[in-house]
Amino acid sequence: MTADQAGARDDTAPRSAPNVPVVIVGAGPVGVTAALLLARRGVRSVVLERHRDVYPLPRAVATDDEVRRILQAAGVHEEFAALARPANGLRLLDARHRLIAEFPRRPHGHHGFPQTSMFDQPELERLLRDALARRPECEVRGGIEVTAVEQGADGPVRVTYRDDEGEHLLRADAVLGCDGAGSLTREAIGAVWEDLRFEESWTVIDVRTRARVRSWEGVDQVCDPHRPATFMRIGEDRYRWEFRLREGEHLDGPDGREHLRELVAPWVDISYGDDFQLIRQAQYTFRARIADRWRRGRVFLLGDAAHLTPPFIGQGLCAGMRDAYNLTWKLARVLQDGADERLLDTYESERKPHARHVIRLAVATGWAMTGGQGGAAAIRRSLLAAACRVPALPAAAGHRLSPRAGRGPLVRRRVRPGGRDLAGTFCPQPWVTADSRRTRLDDALGDAFAVLAGAPLRPSVRAVAEGIGARAVTTDSLGDDGTLAAWLRDGRADAVLLRPDRIVLDTVPAGAGCFTDIATWAPLLCTARRPVPDEQPARPA
């Protein structure tokens, strides 16, 4: 049943159905992270999950430094660091396993964490569930089936679910659909897939072994149309291979192990007596799709419910975590502070272009691996190898995973002749000193808006900060290594307004005195007081 059909059932609904601020459908990493982020802002939620416990088999295995920063915001980054393994980056290899290109990833990225980390998804999910269990603002209900998500013209969203005791109803101010590729929530809002033209069947093999595996501590992508493959080390004795098998090929039956032995031979020599434990073998169809809409009213799609990407650049889970980070602070602002409903429109307008961008990068990588035979394919691979020998390109490719947010109500970008506008970019996260102890910048700033200035704040800037409940700090007071001051200078900004997700909303251009677009974004945030008007440049207060 769709969200527009709710009215037909209102008269038969139990009048005692409990009201909760947010219902989250799906307790995977995206859903539980969303619940944690909401809980840290004091927003209560109920998470509904069909499995009774963490799904035990590995799926996602890679994350980037931006998502590590999101896990920091959720309060679990230290625990995650104990189970994550930093990786060196990505290599493209030809059919003979000769290097075509290498995309190194730094151990300390812009966000303050290793640019690529490998992990085991069940371990991450357990970590997130344990953290959520410590939060009184949230409850996880497992072993249930959500049967309907309905929303009429007004009033709360109705979520019907079934468990061993029968059928139940919840009324919610908002519903987050984190229920995967087969999302019922997506159907409920009438969204359909847009096909981005990539679909291939691959076999994924997860292995535990103490045998000597030839690994450069990064990811290998074998660009061979006859036998494309991916290999990565996940943990101390954990490895993953992904192969596109030919029609009729399989790894089952009496000949399966011998065929597996042949497939992994470029990386490891195994014999029948070796310690080579097959944890999981599964066939997946890798698809590239994006939902045509991500929201109807107070019902939202996140993660695989909103977008599907091939795994070739390791961004499937990352994209869903970015969805959760982008939406939750806005939803909390609307539910708790009375912010304008239009603030929620910026979720899809900001996240959808980025998700499409990442999917296209993954598809392009997939075609580099599998894109046909003959002269044209060979020429493409030769051009790729030549391009990747340009020193700046591998580094630039990594930055394209987190491009600048597009211009909108919450990103006040301007044309800056002779300078780089910081609006829409992420603030770097160095180590700073707060309350006489070393900590990461985000932990020092807290979960709300922040104004970061390179000099003492003028009254006009301080008034804006107070109006939206932002913490105001100067770079001198933070005692970092000079990263923040240099970042402001490079962007020709005296100060920046940081959103709770640490994207720059607006800037005070050098010498300008105050933010220049307050009238555009302040009404969306429902400021506590009217900001003072722009003032002429004056001496700092």
Image (cartoon, rainbow, N blue to C red):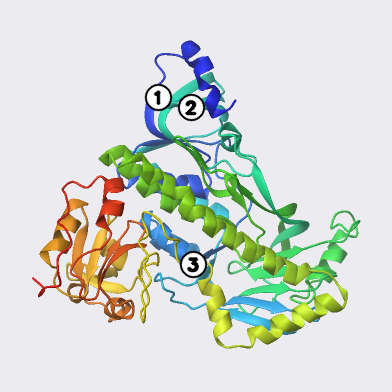
Q: Residue at x 62, y 68 (%)?
A: 237
Q: For residue 223, which quarter of the picture?
A: bottom right
| Amino acid on which the number 2 mark rests in the picture | Gln
Secondary structure of residue under mark 3: loop
Q: Relative to 323, say whether 411 is above or below.
A: below
Q: Residue at x 71, y 66 (%)?
A: 366
Tag 3 and tag 1, C-beta contact below 8 Å = no
Q: Quadrant of the C terminus?
A: bottom left
10 Å crowding of disc 1: few (<14), some (14-19), many (20+): few
User: As drawn, is 459 to the left or to the right of 236?
Assistant: left
| Amino acid on which the number 1 mark rests in the picture | Gly
Secondary structure of residue under mark 2: loop
Q: Measure the alpha-carbon separation of dots 2 and 1.
A: 8 Å
User: As drawn, is 211 to the left or to the right of 62?
Assistant: right
Q: Relative to 413, say whether 345 is above or below.
A: above
Secondary structure of residue under mark 1: loop
| Amino acid on which the number 3 mark rests in the picture | Pro
Tag 2 and tag 1, C-beta contact below 8 Å = yes
- Is 387 in front, or is 25? 387
- Looking at the image, is mark 3 or mark 2 earlier in the sequence? 2
* Residue 97 in sight from this viewpoint: no
Q: Residue at x 39, y 67 (%)?
A: 426
Q: Residue at x 13, y 72 (%)?
A: 456
In the picture of the structure, the residue carrying the numbered disc 2 is: 151
* Residue 380 in sight from this viewpoint: yes
Q: Quadrant of the N terminus?
A: top right
Q: Measure the alpha-carbon separation of dots 3 and 2.
A: 34 Å
User: As drawn, is 521 to the left or to the right of 456?
Assistant: right
In the picture of the structure, the residue carrying the numbered disc 3 is: 403
In the picture of the structure, the residue carrying the numbered disc 1 is: 155
Q: Position of residue 23 (x, y in %)?
A: 44, 34
